[in-house]
Amino acid sequence: MRVTILLSLCGLLVSSFSAFSATETTATTSINRLISYNQYGGGDVAFTVVHPSAGCDGYWINKADPGFDANMSMILAAYHAKAPVRVHGLNDQKWQGTGSFWCKLYAIEHIQ
């Protein structure tokens, strides 16, 4: 019984660690390029920042993502205001629309 509990706890720890290790975060930066596709990917939006993280050359979201509208609003506001942001990207979900490595957007935060 103790072995089963210990193995279950180890499994939870490993799964939590692997989810965390797939996220890369930028330093405080700003959005310098914004691309919206009408058909590619069903409505993908991609963007780059002045100071990307080491593993993400750019970031992307898809129209079908649950948080698309909220994230798009924050991206547009930051882009037009040249506001400082911090971007969190999933480095295990590469965007197929480029030859370099663009990460799926996990979160974007406005920084004051």
Image (cartoon, grey):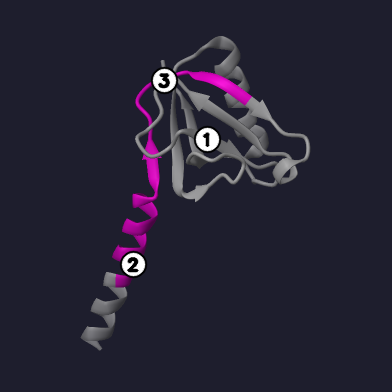
In the depicted view, which residue is nearer to us: 40 or 111?
40
Q: Mark 2 near mark 1, Cβ–Cβ under 8 Å? A: no
* Occupied quadrant, residue 112: top left
In the depicted view, which residue is nearer to us: 28 or 44?
44
43 to the left or right of 98:
right
- Labels 2 and 1: the sequence-earlier one: 2
Mark 2 or 1: the one toward you = 1
Q: Is residue 101 magenta?
A: no
Q: Position of residue 90 (x, y in %)?
A: 46, 45
Q: Dot 1 corresponds to which residue?
A: 59
Q: Tell which residue pokes out farthest to the front in this image.
A: 99
- Labels 3 and 2: the sequence-earlier one: 2
Q: Tell which residue pokes out farthest to the bottom in this image.
A: 1
User: Residue visible at 78% across and 40% down?
Assistant: 39
Q: Dot 2 corresponds to which residue?
A: 12
Q: Dot 3 corresponds to which residue?
A: 29
Q: Position of residue 97 (x, y in %)?
A: 62, 41
Secondary structure at badge 3 equals loop
User: Residue visible at 55% across and 18% down?
Assistant: 78
- Labels 1 and 3: the sequence-earlier one: 3
